[in-house]
Image (spheres, helix red, strand yellow):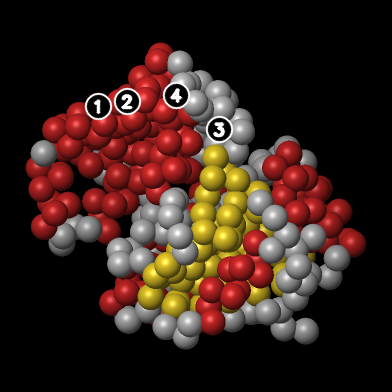
């Protein structure tokens, strides 16, 4: 039977997270869905956990991509190609739906036929450090609405499959394949919708080097996505000043909000280290493009904590 919606999950050594995530997905009020895992070389028990669920449920599938072929876009394209639904959700393995109506809320957002992409709210997991939570609050806030820009995030996003078929995800980008596709969808007159109700809790467990690498690959990707954009050209020309201003704004905001924060790592040293890592990575990403071999090791398979 054709599923109403497909949930595509990229994973690499996400065993502990999947033990939390899969039961939440199986408890959703919307029952007509399939889960498609695309694994890129897990060796921590992830494959065994998924296989156990596959043996019990007919709507769970597992596909593989070799490490040396992996990019975020390519992995998602595999999952979207194998999906059997007209609505396809991209969900991070460490993004946990806040309630059992998460999937239903995403689907309902497509009642407007002009909407081609929906991205949901991402709130900070209790174990996510304070500065990371600050970033998430900046990106995901306010009421549900059609947005004027092209921001979205594949940690918790859904697409009409025909929107994806028009362009597919760019397999060469070092990240932000979601924003790239959103930009192309806008050109094709599709609307992007932000759903505050389709909320997940996003868990980040990263050391400062990995944080810097994440922002570096995203800056490199954004530079390539917006290479013909005059505003981004000015950022590239004045990267140091842009990063310095961002660092100071971020530190100031984090300090102001740290007193009432329930997140860990809200002390001044942790705040400075996070924001320094963020903008050092951003600076490096705007200034340089990385070779494919080094990119694979550093961007896609960073050292474990």
- CB contact under 8 Å: marks 4 and 1: no
The answer to which of marks 4 and 1 sits earlier in the sequence is: 1
Q: CA distance from mark 4 to mark 1?
A: 15 Å
**Real-space Cα separation, disc 4 to disc 2, in angstroms:** 10 Å
Which is more N-terminal, label 3 or label 1?
Answer: 3
Horizontal and vertical percent position of residue 83: 63, 74
* Residue 251: numbered disc: 2
| Crowding near the residue tagged with mark 3, few <14, some 14–19, many ≥20 C-alpha atoms within 10 Å | many
Q: Nearer the viewer, residue 114 or 281?
A: 114
Q: Residues within 10 Å of mark 1 (few under 14, many from 20)?
A: some
Q: Which residue is mark 4?
A: 258
Q: Earlier in the sequence, mark 3 or mark 4?
A: 3
Instruction: Estimate the spatial distance between the alpha carbons at disc 2 and disc 1, rounded to whole Å.
Output: 5 Å
Answer with the quarter of the image where residue 240 lies: top left
Residue 230: where, in percent of width, then height? 11, 57
Q: Is residue 254 left or right of residue 228?
A: right
What is the spatial separation of the Cα atoms under label 3 and label 4, in whole angstroms?
13 Å
Quadrant location of the N terminus? bottom right
In the image, residue 82 above or below residue 237: below
From this view, report whether residue 5 is shown above or below residue 64: below
Give the residue number, with chain letter if any, for mark 3.
Answer: 128
Residue at the spot x=26%, y=44% of the render? 289
């Amino acid at each position: 039977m054709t599923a109403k919606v497909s949930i595509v999950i990229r994973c690499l050594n996400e065993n502990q997270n999947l033990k939390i995530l899969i039961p939440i997905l199986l408890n959703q009020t919307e029952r007509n869905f399939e889960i498609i895992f695309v694994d890129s070389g897990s060796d921590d028990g992830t494959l065994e956990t998924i296989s156990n669920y596959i043996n019990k449920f007919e709507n769970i599938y597992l596909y593989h991509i070799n490490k040396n072929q992996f990019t975020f876009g390519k992995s998602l394209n595999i999952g979207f190609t194998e999906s059997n639904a007209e609505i396809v959700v991209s969900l991070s393995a460490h993004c946990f739906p806040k309630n059992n109506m998460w999937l239903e809320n995403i689907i309902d957002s497509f009642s407007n036929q002009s909407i081609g992409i929906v991205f949901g709210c991402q709130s900070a997991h209790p174990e996510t450090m304070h500065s990371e939570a600050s970033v998430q609050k900046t990106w995901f806030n306010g009421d549900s609405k059609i947005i004027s820009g092209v921001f979205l995030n594949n940690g918790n996003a859904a697409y009409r499959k025909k929107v994806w078929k028009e362009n597919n995800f760019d397999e060469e980008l070092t990240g932000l394949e979601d924003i790239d596709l959103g930009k192309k969808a806008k050109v094709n007159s599709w609307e992007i919708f932000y759903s505050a109700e389709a909320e997940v809790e996003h868990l980040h467990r990263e050391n400062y080097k990995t944080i810097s690498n994440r922002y570096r690959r995203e800056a490199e990707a954004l530079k390539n996505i917006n290479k013909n954009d005059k505003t981004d050209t000015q950022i590239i020309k004045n990267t140091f000043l842009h990063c310095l201003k961002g660092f100071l704004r971020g530190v100031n905001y984090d300090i102001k909000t740290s007193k009432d924060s329930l997140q860990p790592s809200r002390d001044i040293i942790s705040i400075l280290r996070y924001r320094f890592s963020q903008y050092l990575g951003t600076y490096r990403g705007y200034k340089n493009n990385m070779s494919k071999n080094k990119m694979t090791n550093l961007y896609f398979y960073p050292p474990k904590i």
